[in-house]
Image: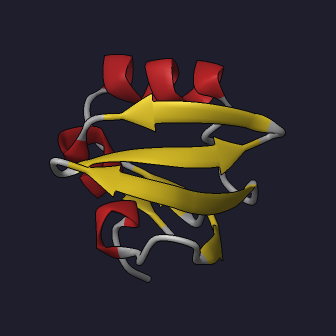
């Protein structure tokens, strides 16, 4: 398991765990970041990441990306 922030652009993974505070986990869950969901890291821009999850493209901060383990 590695943090989503460490994944290379263009790589595929499956979400194993979402950490952080309860409000952060709920926010990410509402965006589709749930355990078992397939995810693709599309790009890294200034440390932030753009990912494809549940047929949507979402941009999240590097801090949030470190809370998601793939």
Residue 10 or residue 13, whichever sits in front: 10
Q: Tell me the colour scheme of the image.
A: secondary structure
Residue 58 location, x and y as percent? Answer: 55, 32
Q: Is residue 42 above or below residue 7?
A: above
Q: Quadrant of residue 4?
A: bottom left
Q: Is residue 36 above or below residue 26?
A: below
Rendered residue at 83%/39% (across/down): 55
Rendered residue at 26%/55% (across/down): 66
Residue 15 or residue 6, whichever sits in front: 6
Residue 21 location, x and y as percent? Answer: 26, 29
Quadrant (top left, top right, bottom left, bottom right) of the N terminus:
bottom left
Relative to residue 19, is residue 55 drawn left or right?
Answer: right
Residue 29 location, x and y as percent? Answer: 59, 28
Residue 5 or residue 28, whichever sits in front: 5
Q: Quadrant of residue 22?
A: top left
Residue 6 location, x and y as percent? Answer: 30, 73
Relative to residue 36, is residue 46 drawn left or right?
Answer: left
Q: Quadrant of residue 14?
A: bottom right
Relative to residue 69, is residue 48 drawn left or right?
Answer: left
Rendered residue at 55%/57% (across/down): 42
Q: Is residue 54 above or below residue 65?
A: above
Q: Is residue 36 above or below residue 33?
A: below
In the image, farthest residue toward the bottom: 1
């Amino acid at each position: 398991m590695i943090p989503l922030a460490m994944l290379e652009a263009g790589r595929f993974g499956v979400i194993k765990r979402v950490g952080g505070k309860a409000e952060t986990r709920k926010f990410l869950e509402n965006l589709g970041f749930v355990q078992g969901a397939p995810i693709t890291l599309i790009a890294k821009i200034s440390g932030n990441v753009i990912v494809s999850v549940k047929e949507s493209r979402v941009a999240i901060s590097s801090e949030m990306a470190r809370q998601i383990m793939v």
